Image (cartoon, rainbow, N blue to C red):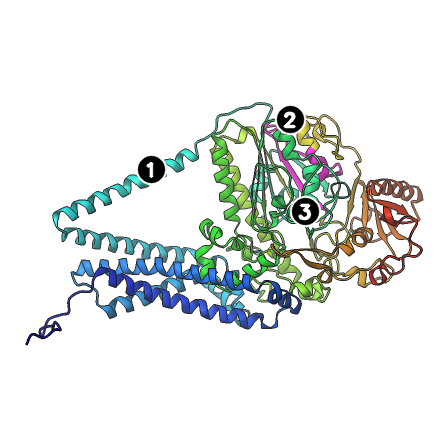
Amino acid sequence: MTDSVTRIAPGLSPPPAPSWRVWLRCVLTAEIILIAVFAACTFRLLHKNADANPTITTEVTRNYLAFTYWYSAGILAGYCLVGLVWGSFCWAIVASWGAVRNRPPSKRGAILASALLIALMSLYMTAAYAVHSPQVLENILTSDDGLQAIVSLGRWTPPWLLTLLRGAFEAASCVLIVAGLTCAIRRMNHPRRRAALTLTATLPIIAAGLGLGLAIDRLPAKNRHDSHPNILILATDGLRQDHLGAYGYPKPTSPNIDRLAADAVRFNEVYVPQARTLPSWTSILTGTYPHTHGQRFTWPRESHIPMPLATLPRELARQGYASYAISDWVGGDFAKVDFGFTAVHVAPEAWSLKTWIAQAICQGHPLLVALADNPLGYRLYPAMEGMPINPNPENVTQETLSTLGRLARRDQPFFMIVFYSETHLPYATRYPYYQTFASPAYQGRQKLNAVPPSLEDAAGGKFDPDAYFNVAQLRALYDGAILSFDDQVGQVVASLKNLNLWDDTIVIITSDHGENLLESPSSWGHGNFLFDANYDSRIPLIISDPALRGSSPRSIDEVTSSVNLMPTLLQRLGLPAPDSCEGRSFADLLRGQRPPRDGTIFAESAELLGGEKQLTWDSYLRYPPLAKMLEVTEPASGLIGIKKEYFDLLIEARQRMVRTSRWKLLYAPLVEGARYQLFDLQADPLCRSDVQDAHPQVFADLRAALWDWMKGDSQRRQRGDHLVPRALVGKIETAGNIGESGLK
């Protein structure tokens, strides 16, 4: 009777498994390992967030639990996709090795080889990315020992060594795969061999076609030299002018900007009307003050805001300009407000609970972050493009260079804003910037970045910034962030020259506001107060105009405001400023056609981040810490905004300032009346001594000018020394402590 089971004769090897089975084993091995990594990281995330902010935890549990599960499922799908790709790569290596040796891989051999390759690739990718961007591991290794391990990894592992190892591995893999493919083709029968050779021969042709397409995309432009030059604004959030070499800073933070400034016009006394991103950019792009354009809060309640005023992109569009805004997480406001840009490329909304959830999940999976930190990864996981702890300025720069390459082939002028985030808290940068200016001896918690405590603590006034931050390290991180931005500027300027756009482009270096770096107690961040020297209100402004290049560089000390930039650029193009514009052009000053004048600027503070100063003086108007004034305003998007009941109080309670080249008058509303302080900036640049009694006429003139400006707020009226809503005029009997009792 014939046995129904085929038996293998003694001494003979089992028949080789079909190729698809070897592939399946390699892929399944990769999937099992990566799913285990996903499970371990998820468990770590759950453990870490067990004691998270109760308010946020409750909100997430109540309204966004399904989103959390769905996004986690997307992360798991990403791991599975990586497993498919890596498993297929392992199969190619295993199969090629078997083809070269003419010994098909065994079941155990394929599994063990795949497991080893997957483990090595996972460790390498995580370690290499941690050296380049160490913050990727900081969310996992949160202890002091863990932080030191990350720092040591970057200190003792030079990036060139990692590049060498990766290059050697990739080269060896390519050689092995080609050798295996060659051996496999030789063993094929004639028809299959011919088909395989034909397919192999087409690959170089496809690659050449792709290269030709990229080359065409970067063709240089023709010189236009007409009355419509391109306008390119390069900015980074919170850039201080006194930390740039062009403004006399001794540390080498800005070599590329310094070279640009050497053949440009530099303004030394430029101030923004409010030192927060949305109000400031809106003022720049409309030429109006916050009380006119209405964007007075960092946290508005709408995700899409119409802008009825004339804007710079719209005015330029009338002249045939295309306009672009390119940024990461700090530039989300360009997509939120209808400024009239032709195209906007920014990260997802930063002030969204959904974004926070997605970013927290991504940060908990460092391997996936390392693999997806690229344009394809950003499409799959948009929240990764907007992680403050892990910025990617190279992505912003690459998008800019690609856009410039396309625009160079068009006979159309453009207006473009490129806005970076490195110099915004937490001043997180990649290798080597985070350590360039830092002391090697410093080993504290701000070694890699200056992340404040939790949002609840930072926005609730529950921490002491003077005790929490190391001042020297804080400034070293900030200077490294400037250097990172400066390198991006260098790349963009080089691209302008390579694309033959330089002689047709006005290049502007500026910012939305400056930054306080603990020059005085509790002075950190920006926009909270108008005390002291106004480091957060002053910005750099360097204008490199092709019509002026080659002449002597000039430094201008006239006090001016960022609201004047829009009418200046329009006049430079021979265009009138729109009627809504409140700024005044300084184009004649830019061209050297008049001497500097004693200009006057106005500014207002923003909502307090943690309620620092209002807790010091009971006489100041008080309101709750920011954390208690925020709420989810759009459940579908998770947008976070300020509660409506605090709008009027927040505007009434903010400080105002009028400033000239010599004098500064500070206004701060109290529960009853207001506190005015006059400072002589020549004798007291840090604003320590009130001199209003010694200069009564100066005080009276500046007070009148300040109130004339404040009355420009059409929604409010003066009542004594307060600016209150029109509807409340004549109805308020006593102000009381508004923060506690509300308007009566």
Q: Residues within 10 Å of mark 3 (few under 14, many from 20)?
A: many
Q: Earlier in the sequence, mark 1 or mark 3?
A: 1
Q: Earlier in the sequence, mark 2 or mark 1?
A: 1
On whether residue 501 falls in the magenta region, the answer is no
Q: Between residue 499 and residue 570, name the one nearer to us.
A: 570
Question: Which range of residues does the magenta coloring cover?
Answer: 537-566
Tell me if 174 is positioned left or right of 216 in this view: left
404, above or below 6, in the image: above
- Secondary structure type for disc 1: helix
27, above or below 237, in the image: below
**Residue position for label 1:** 209
**Residue position for label 3:** 278
Q: Between residue 551 and residue 111, name the one nearer to us.
A: 111
At label 3, the amino acid type is Leu
Tell me if 610 is positioned left or right of 153 in this view: right
* Residue 331: % across, % down: 60, 47
Give me the C-alpha separation between circle 2 and circle 1. 41 Å
Residue in view at x 37 percent, y 68 percent: 32
* Residue 681: % across, % down: 81, 46
